[in-house]
C-alpha cells in the first residue's frame, strides 16, 4: 500500500518496528516518505507519533491501522504472555492509534479511518481463538465508533481480507507449544495452512492494497469491505448460519419479556 501511494505522489507517514525494512523506500522517496519507529503496545509512543505527525504536516487525510499478527494453537496451549501481547498489539494497539487520531481528524473537519481486520472478524475457526478475539473486538469498537464520528465527517472502513501471500502465514505467524492431547484435534488444522508446500494463499496483496486505496474515494465510507472470493463466501455462510440460529429463538427471547401491559 505504501509503495502504491508513494508511486502516485502521496505523502506517507509510515510506522515500522525495523526501519531497515523500508530503507529502499526512504532512499527512493526522501521527500514524501516519513518513517517513524513505533511499537503500538506503547501507548505513550502511539500518541506522541500521532500528535507529532499532525503537527508536522498540518493535515492527514487517512489513518490506516494495520498492526497485527496471527497466533495459532488451542486456547489451552496458549500462555499468558502470548495472550496479553496479541491483545496489546491487535486490539489495544489499534484502539490507541485511532483514539489518538480522532481529535485531529475532528479539528481538521473530517478524514478516513481504515482498520485492517480479517474475514476472521466474522468467521471463527478452531486454533485461532485469541486472533479471533482481537478481530471480533476491533470490529465491534469500530462499528460503534463509526456512528460517533460520522457527524464530524469522519468515515470508518473495516477491511476484512482473506488469505493473502504476505508474511502473515509464512513469516510473522506465532504458534503455541502443542499439547499431546490436541494431536489430531481441529485446533491443529492450521498447521496445514501454514505450510506453503500445501499451496499458497489465493489473495494478491497488491490488488488488495489497490482496492483499499480506492475505497477512500467512496462516500459514504463503506463500513465493511471483504477482500477475496473465498473470504466472502465463508463470511456469507457463517452469517447465514448465525441468522438461522437467531431465528429459531423467537419464542425463547419473548418468554423473558414482561407480558403486555405489565
Image (tube, helix red, strand yellow):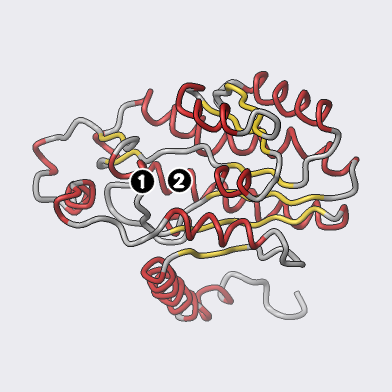
Instruction: Identify the image quadrant of residue 222.
Output: bottom right
Residue situated furthest front in the rendering: 28
Q: CA separation, marks 2 and 1?
A: 6 Å
Please name the residue that numbered disc 1 is placed on.
Answer: 129
Viewer-closest of 125 and 2:
2
The label shown at residue 50 is none
The residue drawn where x is 57% and y is 43% is 2
Which residue is labeled 2 in the image? 133
Q: Position of residue 191 (x, y in %)?
A: 18, 46
Label 2 Cα crowd, 10 Å radius (few <14 / some 14-19 / many 20+): some
- The secondary element bearing badge 2 is classed as helix
Q: Is 154 on the left-hand or right-hand side of 221?
A: right
Residues under numbered marks 2 and 1 in contact, where contact means CB atoms less than 8 Å apart: yes
Q: Residue at x 32, y 62 (%)?
A: 202
x and y, in percent, of residue 44 in the image: 67, 19
Q: Nearer the viewer, residue 145 or 51?
A: 51
Left or right of 148? Residue 249 is left
Q: Is residue 47 left or right of residue 88?
A: right
Residue placed most toward the observer, 253 or 135: 135
Q: Is residue 167 above or below residue 114?
A: above
Amino acid at each position: 500500500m505504501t509503495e502504491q501511494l508513494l508511486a502516485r505522489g502521496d505523502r506517507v507517514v509510515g510506522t515500522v518496528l525495523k526501519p531497515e525494512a523500508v530503507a529502499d523506500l526512504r532512499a527512493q522517496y526522501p521527500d514524501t516518505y516519513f518513517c517513524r519507529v513505533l511499537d503500538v503496545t506503547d501507548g505513550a509512543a502511539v500518541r506522541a507519533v500521532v500528535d507529532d505527525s499532525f503537527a508536522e504536516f498540518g493535515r492527514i487525510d487517512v489513518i490506516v491501522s494495520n498492526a497485527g499478527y496471527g497466533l495459532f494453537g488451542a486456547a489451552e496451549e496458549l500462555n499468558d504472555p502470548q495472550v496479553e501481547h496479541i491483545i496489546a498489539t491487535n486490539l489495544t494497539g489499534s484502539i490507541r492509534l485511532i483514539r489518538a487520531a480522532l481529535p485531529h481528524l475532528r479539528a481538521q473537519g473530517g478524514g478516513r479511518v481504515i482498520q485492517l481486520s480479517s474475514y476472521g472478524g466474522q468467521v471463527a475457526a478452531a486454533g485461532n481463538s485469541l486472533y479471533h478475539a482481537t478481530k471480533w473486538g476491533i470490529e465491534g469498537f469500530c462499528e460503534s465508533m463509526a456512528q460517533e464520528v460520522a457527524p464530524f465527517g469522519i468515515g470508518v472502513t473495516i477491511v476484512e481480507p482473506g488469505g493473502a501471500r504476505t508474511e502473515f502465514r509464512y513469516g510473522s505467524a506465532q504458534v503455541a507449544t502443542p499439547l499431546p492431547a490436541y494431536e489430531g484435534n481441529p485446533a491443529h488444522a492450521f498447521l496445514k495452512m501454514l505450510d506453503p508446500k500445501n499451496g499458497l494463499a489465493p489473495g494478491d496483496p497488491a490488488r488488495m492494497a489497490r482496492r483499499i486505496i480506492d475505497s477512500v474515494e467512496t462516500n459514504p465510507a463503506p463500513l465493511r469491505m471483504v477482500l477475496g472470493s473465498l473470504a466472502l463466501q465463508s463470511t456469507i455462510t457463517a452469517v447465514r448460519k448465525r441468522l438461522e440460529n437467531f431465528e429459531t429463538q423467537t419464542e425463547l427471547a419473548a418468554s423473558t419479556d414482561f407480558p403486555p401491559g405489565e
